């Protein structure tokens, strides 16, 4: 898979989430949070991020639990210009899957912050720390 996130520093152990048995997902994929306590690959801008898939999930394997890092330092790919300290969001619906971009002023679903400056398609270190803020 292109643009997967790679762990740079594990700061917290992975947590277990439910995942559909029919789902096939590469490790390093940004996972969105759905209800109840379920993850699926991020496929939209500003998805509510649960974290990063730790181990590949093979479809129809009978496995319905996935290990997901919800915190840590990762190497990610920029989907545009990013400055150190910027809040980050997903860019899956308008860019490539697993790209991260700088969050807009009123972005509500932050996946973390940039630890380095990068331009489009460059890799950078990010701090994964998903949070949802209601600015409305």
Image (spheres, helix red, strand yellow):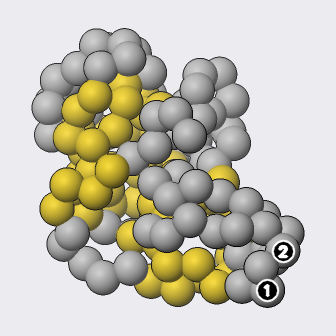
Q: Residues within 10 Å of mark 2 (few under 14, many from 20)?
A: few
Quarter holding residue 119? top left
Residue 76's place in the image compared with 67, above or below, is: above
Q: Position of residue 88 (x, y in %)?
A: 37, 38
The residue shown at (69%, 29%) is 93
Is residue 99 found left or right of 12 in the rendered image? right
Task: Give yes or no for contact between labels 1 and 2 (Cβ–Cβ under 8 Å).
Answer: yes
In the image, which disc is placed on residue 92? none
Answer yes or no: is residue 61 visible: yes
The residue shown at (68%, 39%) is 44
Quarter holding residue 54? bottom left
Q: Position of residue 101 (x, y in %)?
A: 42, 28
Is residue 58 found left or right of 2 in the rendered image? right
Please state which of residues 93 and 57 is positioned toward the viewer in this rendering.
Answer: 57
Q: Residues within 10 Å of mark 1 (few under 14, many from 20)?
A: few
Q: Position of residue 131 (x, y in %)?
A: 42, 60
The residue shown at (56%, 65%) is 56
How many numbered marks have been drawn onto this rendered protein structure?
2
The residue identified by callout 2 is 60
Answer yes or no: is residue 113 visible: no
Is residue 65 found left or right of 67 in the rendered image? right
CA gap, disc 1 and disc 2: 6 Å
The residue shown at (70%, 68%) is 58
Residue 46's place in the image compared with 109, above or below, is: above
**SS class, disc 2:** loop
**SS class, disc 1:** loop
Residue 58's place in the image compared with 32, above or below, is: below
Name the quarter where the N terminus is drawn: top right
In the image, which disc is placed on residue 62? 1
């Amino acid at each position: 898979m292109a643009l997967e996130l790679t762990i740079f520093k594990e700061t917290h152990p992975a947590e277990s989430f439910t995942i559909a048995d029919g789902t096939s997902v590469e490790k390093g994929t940004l996972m969105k949070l759905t209800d109840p306590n379920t993850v699926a690959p991020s496929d939209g801008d500003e998805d509510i991020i649960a974290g990063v898939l730790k181990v590949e999930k093979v479809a129809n394997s009978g496995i319905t639990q996935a290990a997901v890092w919800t915190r840590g330092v990762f190497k990610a790919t920029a989907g545009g210009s990013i400055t150190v300290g910027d809040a980050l969001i997903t860019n899956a619906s308008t860019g490539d899957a697993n790209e991260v971009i700088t969050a807009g002023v009123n972005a509500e679903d932050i996946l973390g912050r940039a630890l380095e400056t990068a331009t489009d398609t460059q890799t950078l270190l990010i701090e994964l720390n998903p949070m949802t803020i209601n600015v409305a």
